[in-house]
Amino acid sequence: MRQISPFRYPGGKTWLVPTISAWLRRRRNPLSILIDPFTGGGSVPLGVLCEGLVDGIVLGELDPDVSALWRCVFSPKHEDLCRKIAAFSMTRENVLRELGRDPKTGVDHAFQVLLKNRTFRGGILAPGASLMKVGENGRGVASRWYPETLVKRIKALGALRTAIEFVEGDAFALIKQYLNRKDVAYFIDPPYTVGNGKRAGRRLYTHSELNHSALFELLSRSAGLVLMTYDDCPEAVKMAIHHGFQVERIPMKNTHHEKKYELLISNCGRPA
């Protein structure tokens, strides 16, 4: 699956795009909007939009740093961001110097977020994250810095911005706006895990607490389609079944190429 997002995002779902696309193609009635209230790296909604499966997408994100990059990408200022990326000389010293500055503009903020994401271990932006040392093939902080590729992705997304609405704020409030619409689909990938993953969530994400039961209850009232992805754990299965959702376990590979399972939870037929 081709990469669309400029982010390296922990827990990213690029691998899931073909499954979501197939699920949407099986729907009899066309969809107007796909809503992702926990956008993160945005691979799934952006992939679905690029495949022409919806007319538009609505992206929500609570993290102000992640939001800063997306706001810039989906605005005319994305061209300024591309110029900063192309002009930057990637060295450890330059990274530290850039990140030590106070951003004066939205473009400056977006560039610093992208720089952190591409030079910090695992792409982690949460407090406590640190710069890569050895990196891939001994390239250190330059291991994941591909300026030409990043510029290409950002320009492509910038060209789609009229079909994208970005909202910084609470996921629950965004979900409620569309609950009664039958022509929408929700893709829900909360970056906050339940069960044994709570500790990992705190390490990976700035905002790592969520009332999962309230999320299931809210989505159970949706008139539109719902597809959720969760860690494979008994707590999530129990909540899904209690609120009338169907559950499917599907295999995936993590960043260490280890096979594991995740849950796909749907209110409209088997998603996988």
Image: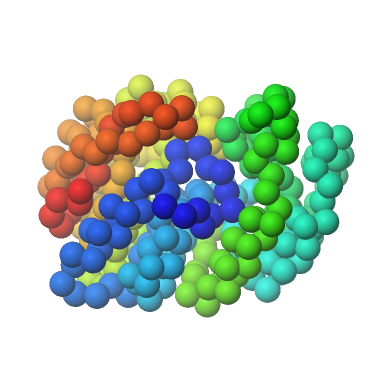
User: Percent x, y for residue 77?
Assistant: 71, 69
Residue 125 visible to the viewer: yes
Q: Residue at x 17, y 33 (%)?
A: 238
Residue 100 visible to the viewer: no
Q: Is residue 145 left or right of residue 84?
A: left
Task: Residue 91: name its quadrant.
Answer: top right
Above or below residue 35? Residue 201 is above
Q: Residue at x 42, y 49 (%)?
A: 14
User: Percent x, y for residue 125?
Assistant: 62, 38
User: Percent x, y for residue 16?
Assistant: 34, 48
Task: Residue 29: name its quadrant.
Answer: bottom left
Residue projecting furthest to the front: 137
Above or below residue 126? Residue 44 is below
Q: Is residue 38 left or right of residue 29?
A: right
Q: Is residue 251 left or right of residue 155?
A: left
Q: Residue at x 38, y 63 (%)?
A: 48
Above or below residue 91? Residue 259 is above
Task: Residue 12: name its quadrant.
Answer: top left
